[in-house]
Image (cartoon, rainbow, N blue to C red):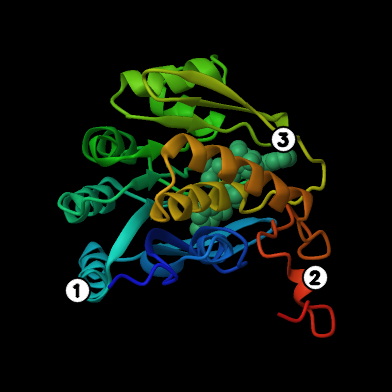
Amino acid sequence: MPDNAAPPVCLTIGTSDSGGGAGIQGDIKALASVGCFTATVLAGLTAQNTTGVLSRHPVPVDFLRAQFDAVRADFDIRAVKVGTTWSAAHLLAIAELLADLAVPVVVDPVMVSAAGGALGGRDARAALIEALLPLADVLTPNVAEARLLTGDETSGPGELAQRLIGLGAPAVVVTSGGDGEDWFADGLTALRLDRPAHRTGAEHGAGCAHSALITGLRAHGLPLSQAVLEATALASGAVRDGLTSIGRGVHPVDVLGLPARAPGRATAV
Ligand SMILES: Nc1ncnc2c1ncn2[C@@H]1O[C@H](COP(=O)(O)OP(=O)(O)OP(=O)(O)O)[C@@H](O)[C@H]1O
Ligand SMILES: Cc1ncc(COP(=O)(O)O)c(N)n1
């Protein structure tokens, strides 16, 4: 008999953030916050903190495959997030590995960090559009990434979302960070997602949390539109509650309510 209380397993394919706020580390926390267990496939490592990306080290594609095979052989994966993936070779391998895994795939095409460091090569653009978009459940770029992907340097998030649908994405959320205007489109509807814009300076990891939360909520079986609305509200709350005492740059978001978990503060269950 299926155990309905068992946490669904999600897989995140992306890159380590040594600063702990974004990337794979951010994904694990965001997925845990919505009751998911997370398996990880690393495509690369960064030497990074809240002030920026200091150094980077892609993982060889063969070793990416080995991680995927190990995880796939042992877990019932319910949803996948693809984050920072570095190169066309990594993206093509990921598309091949995911081709027969019939679960929602959330693609967050990360190319720049909140603190400004480059996180991907330009050759990745064509591979992402040709190989990964056809497998995606939803694509979640920010405005800068949507402009890079479409080559449209001037349009706002609503129009960029429509353009990405035109490039083959089945659904898109274009996020606008502190500008507060995110847009959802799925080919049938286009919707502005109203949410507050918080000025806490704690946005490091917001985009990673947002796409990981959509992934986790999809793993629980929520319809895409509901998963997007809930993830938007939760990611926005994580910026509002961000950890402004941590780091000297763009502070990390907090999806877990860490201050309330300190010894003596936690509510007894
Ligand atoms: N200043 C803010 N106030 C409220 N919510 C925010 C803020 N910044 C980010 N968010 C939340 O985080 C989500 C992602 O936002 P953002 O555009 O900053 O992502 P990003 O980090 O640029 O994305 P990517 O991972 O694609 O690089 C938004 O949908 C929103 O819910
Ligand atoms: C390894 C890695 N992946 C993704 C991001 C983007 O996160 P953000 O734009 O929220 O800083 C990052 N900074 N580092």
Which residue appears at 39% of the width and 60% of the height?
12
Q: Nearer the viewer, residue 124 or 5?
A: 5
Check disc 2 and report the residue beneath it. Answer: 259
The N terminus lies in quadrant: bottom left
Q: N-terminal of the two: label 3 or label 1?
A: 1
Q: CA distance from mark 2 to mark 1?
A: 37 Å
Q: Secondary structure at mark 1?
A: helix
Which residue appears at 78% of the width and 77% of the height?
267
Q: Which of the numbered marks, if any, corresponds to residue 178?
A: 3
Quarter of image, res 47: bottom right
Dot 3 alpha-carbon crowd within 10 angstroms: few under 14, some 14 to 19, many 20 or more: some
Instruction: Examine the rendered structure and indicate whether residue 132 appears above or below residue 238.
Output: above
Q: CA distance from mark 2 to mark 3?
A: 24 Å
Kindly tell me whether mark 3's CB lies below 8 Å from ligand 1.
yes
Question: Contact, CB < 8 Å: mark 3 with mark 1?
Answer: no
Q: CA distance from mark 3 to mark 1?
A: 41 Å
Kindly tell me whether mark 2's CB lies below 8 Å from ligand 1.
no
Residue 31 shows in the view: yes
The C terminus lies in quadrant: bottom right
Residue sitting at the far front: 1
Q: Secondary structure at mark 3?
A: helix
Instruction: Examine the rendered structure and indicate whether residue 142 appears above or below residue 108.
Output: above
Q: Tell me where residue 205 appears, x and y as whole percent.
A: 61, 53
Check disc 1 and report the residue beneath it. Answer: 73
Q: Tell me where residue 156 appears, x and y as whole percent.
A: 57, 17
